[in-house]
Image: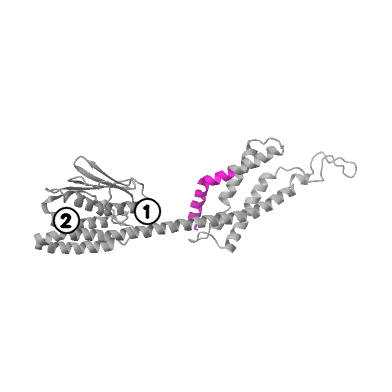
Amino acid sequence: MRASTVVQATWQRMRRPRTWGAALLFGLVWNGTRVLMGLPEPGLIELLTPSLWVALFLVLAPLPWQWTGNDAPIAGPMRGAAQALPWMAALTVGVLLLLGPSGGPPPGRGMGRMERGGLHRGVGPRREDAHWRPLHPRLWILGVAHLSFGLLLGWILADRERAELQEAAARRAAHEAQARVLQGQMNPHVLFNAISGLTELVREDPVAAEAALVNLSDLLRALLEHGSRLRAPLGDERRLVEHHLALERLRLGHRLRETWDWPEALDGLEIPPLMIQPLVENALKHGIALAVGGGTLAVKVTLDENRLCVRVANTGPAPAEVAGQGLGLRNLRERLSLLGAPADALRLHRDGDWTVAELRLEVQA
């Protein structure tokens, strides 16, 4: 990982409940053991120290193993050990200094020691003792255990997070593959509906049908370019909708009336392809085309912070599948689910004489 990614991973580790849960459990066991052994009741600082020490240990131990300077999630054994050894040694020295700087005088140098010449110089510690007090051997043993355990635990935690990252990447790849399959189903679906709408136009108006075939080729080209990506500019979605409406205008004529509120300033935002076109197609097929006098299509696109709000409404009879069970809308719901959108990202309902489809998407500039 690079430095910024390591910092982010460390922050995520600090926020995990299991990190603080493990620290709390260790503190309870540690202080419970003290009580069972009959040791003096600890003060507040002594009571909290074991939990804080373990939390710090769990958060900082994996850090040197994760810093690689590149996109690799964990350093190799040699580099990881070379980075972790001084890091854990520094942490160990810090712990020892916290535990042992106020330790008693060295063994064998008690108070009241008589020096040669009968002078009593043992009233306090010798002058050199004030500057040098060796740590108790048990603290050195604790330090070695701390260092060894820190190296091992750091590698285990870093390797576990590496496995979690790879698993998350595999899930994302699987979701993207499923989204591509569903997205690929939309291309023939759109073309099938467009061609089926032209069959009656061929009989009624051959000249208009010829123009419609030209528009159909433009629609096919736009589908091939637009539908092959996982994210595309909103402007490409606009052009796809315009090609589709050009075909429908030739077929429906004056029966199709449109109102647009789609600011061009939003066209640079990126969304998954084929998100708005199915809503427009559904409004035309199940609403306006079925009404004797046609109807009105109203498309409105707005931006609310980082959320794109799309509202596609149409007059005409209420469709029997207002719950969205058609292929286009069912496909759209499945793709939204794979992309991690909330369950209410797509909502269909009746508002008076209007059938309204509302879509909310997280967008990228």
Spatial distance from mark 1 to mark 2, Cα to Cα? 31 Å
Tell me the magenta residue range: 1-23
Kindly identify the residue that appears in the image at 37 percent across and 60 percent down: 177
Q: What colouring does the structure picture have?
A: one colour
Q: Mark 2 packing: few (<14 Cα in 10 Å), some, or many (20+)?
A: many
Q: Position of residue 26 (x, y in %)?
A: 61, 44
**Which is the main secondary structure of the residues drawn in magenta?**
helix
- The secondary element bearing badge 2 is classed as helix
Sequence-first disc among 1 and 2? 2
- The secondary element bearing badge 1 is classed as helix
What amino acid does circle 2 point to?
Glu
Is 244 placed above or below 353 here? below
Q: Position of residue 79 (x, y in %)?
A: 58, 62
Does any portion of residue 132 appear in the rendered image? no
The residue at which mark 2 appears reads as 248
**Is 262 on the left-hand or right-hand side of 211?**
right
Kindly identify the residue that appears in the image at 19 percent across and 48 percent down: 287
Is 89 placed above or below 28 here? below
